[in-house]
Image (spheres, grey):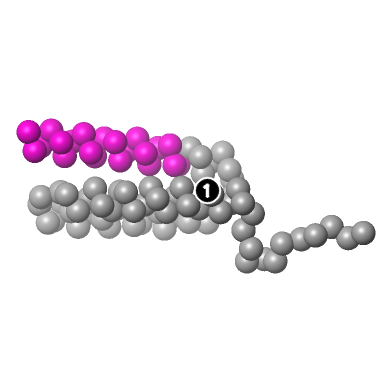
Amino acid sequence: MAATRLPPTALSLKQFLRRQQVLQLYRKILRTIRQIPNEADRRYMRDWAREDFKRNKEATDEDAIKMMITHGNLQLQELERTLKLAKS
């Protein structure tokens, strides 16, 4: 009996869930960046986020991806704290 293989474009459940995590983080970062009052700063941060995600798009090592997601969440929290402080 031959082993069942996924077509090249199909994702495993684990890959699908990891992809959803990355997309969710990306959307949260972009939404948070929209709150930056200065347009030049907002554009800089948006471009930085896009480039950072593009640069790591081809990553396949699970541990590296987990680390990048954790790092991204920490950066998002820092940005949210900074914006909150700026508003107060």
Image quarter where the N terminus lies is: bottom right
Segment colored magenta? 68-88
Q: Is residue 61 left or right of residue 78?
A: right
User: How many marks do you count on the picture?
Assistant: 1
Residue 20 in the image, given as x and y percentages of width and height: 48, 52
Image quarter where the C terminus lies is: top left
Q: Which residue is mark 1?
A: 18
Q: Residue at x 34, y 57 (%)?
A: 50
Residue type pointed to by label 1: Arg
Q: Is residue 11 left or right of residue 2?
A: left
Residue 58 in the image, given as x and y percentages of width and height: 52, 56
Residue 7 in the image, given as x and y percentages of width and height: 70, 66
Tell me, yes or no, if residue 59 can be seen here. no
Tell me, yes or no, if residue 20 can be seen here. yes
Q: Say few, some or many: other residues with alpha carbon within 10 Å of mark 1 (under 14 / 14 to 19 / 20 or more).
A: some
Q: Is residue 78 a member of the stretch shown in magenta?
A: yes
SS class, disc 1 = helix
Q: Residue at x 10, y 52 (%)?
A: 38
Q: Is residue 83 a member of the stretch shown in magenta?
A: yes
- Our reading of the magenta stretch's main secondary structure is helix
Q: Residue at x 27, y 57 (%)?
A: 47
Residue 73 in the image, given as x and y percentages of width and height: 37, 39
